[in-house]
Image (cartoon, rainbow, N blue to C red):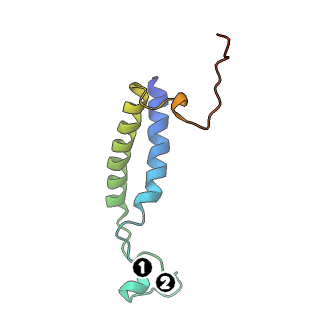
Amino acid sequence: MPIITSIAIYFVVWWFMLFTVLPWGVKGQYEDGGVVKGTEPGAPSKPVMKKKMIQNSVLSLVVWAIIMVIIKFDLITIDNIPFFPDFVPKDI
């Protein structure tokens, strides 16, 4: 697989995982009792974005590695997906 394709897959996985990691351990301002005037009460009181970016990058690397192993060793192919039609003609 070309390196550009691998980087593109990591980029997509990173963005997908970002929305998974963002809510981890977040407490809203209303939960801490310190709602800042003019802000949404559900907004995080301490977002700790640096920590979340590190967590996201590590988790994305693990998921990306699993995807690369699946692709490299053909563990899942189109033939394994039952609802896909058979694209190979029968007379060959």
The amino acid type of the residue labelled 2 equals Pro
61 is higher (above) or lower (below) than 2: below
Query: Residue 45 location, x and y as percent?
Result: 39, 77
Q: Is residue 16 left or right of residue 54?
A: right
Residue at mark 2? 41
16 is higher (above) or lower (below) than 30: above
The amino acid type of the residue labelled 1 equals Gly
Q: Residue at x 31, y 60 (%)?
A: 51
Q: Residue at x 50, y 88 (%)?
A: 37
Q: Secondary structure at mark 2?
A: loop
Q: Is residue 71 left or right of residue 86?
A: left
Q: How many marks?
A: 2
Whether the residues at callouts 2 and 1 have beta carbons within 8 Å, the answer is yes
Ranked by sequence position, the earlier of labels 2 and 1 is: 1
Q: In the drawing, what numbered circle is on residue 28?
A: 1
70 is higher (above) or lower (below) than 62: above
Looking at this rendering, what residue extends furthest in the top direction? 92
Query: Residue 34 location, x and y as percent?
Result: 39, 88
Q: Is residue 89 left or right of residue 70?
A: right
Query: Residue 5 location, x and y as percent?
Result: 49, 29
**Of residues 23 and 41, the one drawn nearer to the viewer in this rendering:** 23
Q: Residue at x 34, y 49 (%)?
A: 59
Looking at this rendering, what residue extends furthest in the front direction? 91
The residues bearing labels 2 and 1 have C-alpha atoms spaced at a distance of: 7 Å
Quarter-of-image position of residue 83: top right
Query: Residue 66 location, x and y as percent?
Result: 36, 38
Q: Residue at x 39, y 85 (%)?
A: 31
Label 1 neighbour load within 10 Å: few <14, some 14-19, many 20+? some
Quadrant where the C terminus sits is top right
